[in-house]
Image (tube, grey):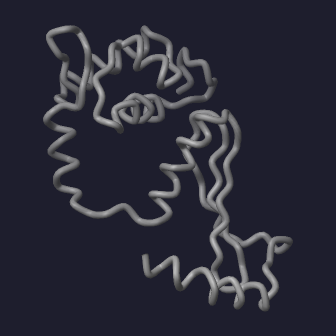
Amino acid sequence: MAGNSADSGRSVTSKVVAILLTFNDGTVHSVTEIARLAGLPISTTHRLVSELAAWGILERTDDLQYRVGVQLHAIGATAGCVPSMPERARRVMEDVSIATHSDVRLGILQGTEVRYIEKTAGHQPGRCTRRPDPCRRMPPRWARRFSRSHLRAWWKR
């Protein structure tokens, strides 16, 4: 399961996902760039990228670079849905965590409780805390004041 990665305990699935996420902005990368961005050894990256290219998930260019392949485009085209607010927040939090090399936490007000989406530094995905933290309850007066003055205007945008 762990293999020869910089992070012990990293699954093959997490490695493949890390490779695919390097293409989230539509760029073209060499194997060395993919390895650096995904935090994987070059040998592991080469093996996985070659297999992804064989399946058509990635495509190898004439100048030995890789880009998103036909199969991955087909999967993306069938999705056709707008990402949810938590999914968009998770993507931004991934970027902030990578840029700052630190943990990121986003609080979402639900009634008088604040629920969190957390992204720890590293290659682990963000997670949503299901249970509200009892120490983080917002007083009802604050929740009403905040929701009246800010949330309505924000949602109308």
For image coordinates 26% across by 20% down, the residue present is 66
For image coordinates 65% across by 76% down, the residue present is 109
Say left or right for 140 vs 88.
right
Position above or below: 71 against 8 = below
Position above or below: 109 against 4 = below
Q: Position of residue 54 (x, y in %)?
A: 18, 22
Position above or below: 47 against 85 = above
Quadrant location of the C terminus in the rendered image: bottom left
For image coordinates 80% across by 78% down, the residue present is 137
Position above or below: 58 against 45 = below
The part of the image, by quadrant, that contains residue 78 is bottom left
Say left or right for 52 vs 85.
left
Q: Position of residue 58 (x, y in %)?
A: 23, 27
Q: As rendered, which of 73 and 150 lies closer to the eye?
A: 150
For image coordinates 51% across by 31% down, the residue present is 11
Q: As rendered, which of 155 and 106 lies closer to the eye?
A: 155
Q: Position of residue 50 (x, y in %)?
A: 27, 16
Q: Position of residue 48 (x, y in %)?
A: 35, 20
User: Which residue, as the protein is rendered here, is positioned at the far right?
Assistant: 135
The part of the image, by quadrant, that contains residue 97 is top right
- Give the tally of numbered discs: 0
Q: As rendered, which of 116 and 145 lies closer to the eye?
A: 145
Say left or right for 146 vs 43.
right
Q: As rendered, which of 85 and 56 lies closer to the eye?
A: 85
